Image (cartoon, rainbow, N blue to C red):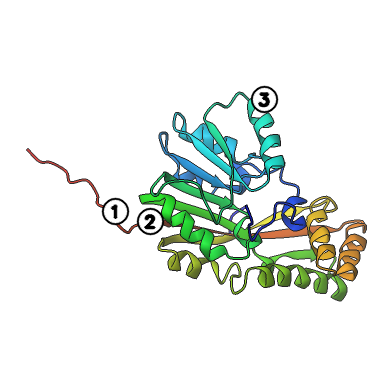
Amino acid sequence: MNPITDPCRPDFPTRAATPTAHRDLESHGFFLTPLLQPGFDVLDAGCGLATITTGIAERVFPARVTAVDISPARLETARRLVEGREIMNINFAAASASHLPFADHSFDVVFAHAVLETLADPARALREFHRVTRPGGFLAVACADWDHCVLEPASARVNSALQACRYLDGNRNGLFQAPTGLRPAITEAGFTPLMQDTWIERHDAPKDILSGLTAGLEHAGQFHHATSLRNWADQPGARFHHAWRYATAVRADGFRPLRRVVE
């Protein structure tokens, strides 16, 4: 372990309300960095506030990063943050991960963090990722891993609320579940998996980070579970161990390595 109509609506509470400002390339994209090189064109699908995107842009300069999000409001905030840092090699586009407005073979690397589990049809998004990835290019994705999330102190009521969150993700996107569904879904989309693992993100003050979960539960009418989480977060010493599952893959189909000419 290491430290448009669209199926995912832009106002979906679990996605929109989750704080993301603390995330950066080192903390939440460390599995992506070995795949980045200067000159690589990268797609960040579901960029949110672009806090990870900026780190990607610095790694691949002078190539460009295309940052896509379905929420125009998030994109506008991201633009202002990027302009303030004077990062010039990021393009923004309002689009769905399931309907990307790009030609085939447009990118050397496609990255998506906390996106697939929010979609009604994550398999469709993965097929889109495969379509826009160049032969020999890479995929790097991460999803919430509810099987390994832990809330302390634990109780039967809190555990039930956590399972309700897991059920919402599973019910929303059918058979897809991280971690068990991630590797098969990537393979089915046409990629060749490289590696996968889980890392734990610890929150010692979980009130803010849980706001997205409680909003999602309320949106689904699970008010008693939302109340359980809020009451739990008010306890002294409450800690949320948020588990993430990541996977990397290569688009090996159609790839032809250059022949070395020997004179």
Image vertical order of residue 113 relative to residue 191, above or below: above
Instruction: Please provide percent x and percent y for residue 94.
Output: 61, 43
* Residue 251: image tag: 2
- Is 258 placed left or right of 203 in the picture? left
- Decide: marks 2, 1 in contact (CB < 8 A)? yes
Instruction: Please provide percent x and percent y for residue 243.
Output: 67, 60
Q: Point out the image quarter for the C terminus.
A: top left
Q: Residue at x 53, y 34 (%)?
A: 57
The residue that label 3 is drawn on is 84
The amino acid marked with disc number 2 is: Arg
Q: Residue at x 86, y 58 (%)?
A: 238
Q: Residue at x 92, y 56 (%)?
A: 236
Image vertical order of residue 6 relative to residue 111, above or below: below
Instruction: Please provide percent x and percent y for residue 72.
Output: 68, 42
- Is 104 placed left or right of 54 in the picture? left
Q: Residue at x 48, y 34 (%)?
A: 64
Separation of disc 3 and disc 2 at Cα? 35 Å
Work out which residue is located at the far left of the displayed protein and give it.
263
Q: Is residue 31 visible?
A: no
Please, what secondary structure does the residue beneath circle 1 have? loop
The residue that label 1 is drawn on is 255
If you read the primary sequence from the N terminus, does the residue marked by circle 3 or circle 1 appear first?
Answer: 3
Q: Is residue 227 visible?
A: yes
Separation of disc 2 and disc 1 at Cα? 8 Å
Q: Residues within 10 Å of mark 2 (few under 14, many from 20)?
A: many
The amino acid marked with disc number 3 is: Gly
Instruction: Please provide percent x and percent y for residue 7.
Output: 64, 61
Query: Which is more toward the observer, 185 or 69?
Result: 69
Image vertical order of residue 219 relative to residue 63, above or below: below
Which image quadrant is residue 117 in? bottom right
The amino acid marked with disc number 1 is: Phe
* Residue 92: image tag: none
